[in-house]
Amino acid sequence: MSLENKVPHQSNTTNHRHLTLGVFGFGCVGQGLYHVLNETPGIKADIKKICVKDKNKSRLLPEKLFTFDKEEILNDPEIDVVVELIDDSNAAFEIVKEALQKGKAVVTANKKMLAEHLEEIYHLQRQYGKPVLYEGSVCGSIPIIRNLEEYYDNDLLTGIEGIFNGSTNYILTKVFEEKKNYSDALQQAQELGFAESDPSLDVKGFDPKFKLVIAIAHTFGVFVKPEDVINIGIDKISELDLKFAYDNHYAIKLVARAFKIKNRVYGFVCPQFIESTHPLYAVRNEYNAVQLESAFAEKQLFVGKGAGSYPTGSAVLSDISALTYQYQYEYKKLHQLNDLQFSNHLLVEAFVSFDKGINISISDFAHFESGYASHGKQYMVGKVSLSKLHEWSLLDGVGIILAPGAVFTPEKKSTSEESFAFA
Ligand code: HSE
């Protein structure tokens, strides 16, 4: 049964109804939303209350707009939509659950909360007949979720890949183009409001993984747990890795990707050397990019700001606007491709650099291609299992970067004739 069947008939329903909003959180995205809402004359929505945590913070808006009691929003019958924009993913999930139980629609940009609870949120929407929209949670201002749901509703998508984290792309751009050091660039990303309050979520690749988990549900109709998806970050990239990239005219990008081979979906996050002819090469600073690959349309690239107050606020606003005409996700792929299973049994072509003394050897590779030693580091290049790469990525002194144009081949013999690569 579709959600639509369960949405109670609203007596005041017109094509575009006016919405009263209760907002949780007034940080970077909350303030961005407030601004873009005020600057968008056509939008039929007003903020009634904003629930915040810190009683001592001075705020520019009138005091009566704020509350410290979440029930003031959740129990207010006039509030139709809860806009959840807080940092704490556990508290966020409780708010989303209670809002749905109380008959309110929800807009959220909380990718960690969504990735951890997506299947449950899908069922809660069906149970209570109210929608949860979350365009702002994946790649900021890029309209990807609604496009996956609507434009690509029947399309045979074979892959999705791209830059899903603004902070790391900003850091890598500054390190490469302005020769800034890594920690200064990270500090700048924090000051600009791009980084998470715990920036290790960005640099270790957790944040883009959460976004990938959400994207996988809307691309392939598969709910995968974040702990089952491998994320390798940019935090262990060494000077030697950077020099190798400069010398070969490559950029390094943190790439999130998922693709389908036969009835398996593979997905992971890992840095990659990118050639200057590749569409992701030109995506700089906090910009994100999503490249879709489909059977008939082939490749399509979306580029836009992936982090920051106004760009993310604009995606949240777009969800609010969609609720004025009762839009909801139908999770169309879930009903189309339900024999797909997520797998990590994959061989990938990678450059592995490591300090002397670390136990990595040629025999760990399924296909060893080349190796050399320089400045106290060793380099090995070849095809290696994703699980082995993950194991190595947890060691200090090991840098892992995928080869440019890497081909991905299932480990199992039954599917080994097929492989996947975004050329
Ligand atoms: N920390 C995130 C990023 C914010 O840098 O992309 C937007 O989700």
Image (tube, rainbow, N blue to C red):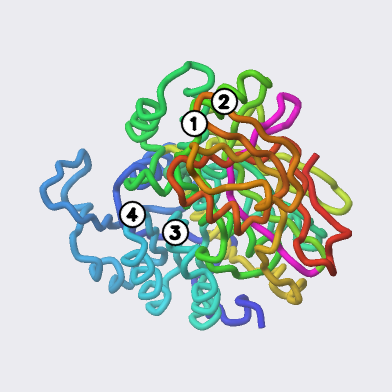
Check disc 2 and give the amino acid type: Ser
Which quadrant of the figure shows ligand 1? Answer: top left
Q: Is residue 207 visible?
A: yes
Would residue 292 appear left or right of 287 to someone viewing this image? right
Regarding mark 3 in the picture, which secondary structure is present there?
A: helix
Report the residue at 39% width, 74% height from top. 97
Would residue 91 appear left or right of 231 to someone viewing this image? left
Q: Is residue 314 visible?
A: no
The residue identified by callout 1 is 238
Check disc 1 and give the amino acid type: Ser
Q: Position of residue 170 (x, y in %)?
A: 48, 30
Rendered position, 166 above or below 51: above
Q: What are the residue bounds of the magenta stretch?
A: 263-280
Q: Give the mark nearer the N terminus: 1 vs 4.
A: 4
Q: Give the crowd class for mark 3: few <14, some 14-19, many >=20 residues within 10 Å.
A: many
Q: Which mark is residue 87?
A: 4
The residue identified by callout 3 is 112
Regarding mark 4 in the picture, which secondary structure is present there?
A: loop
Report the residue at 34% width, 53% height from top. 47
Say whether residue 324 is magenta: no
364 vs 350, nearest the viewer: 364
Q: What is the residue that sits farthest to the left in this orientation?
A: 56
Q: Position of residue 86 (x, y in %)?
A: 33, 55
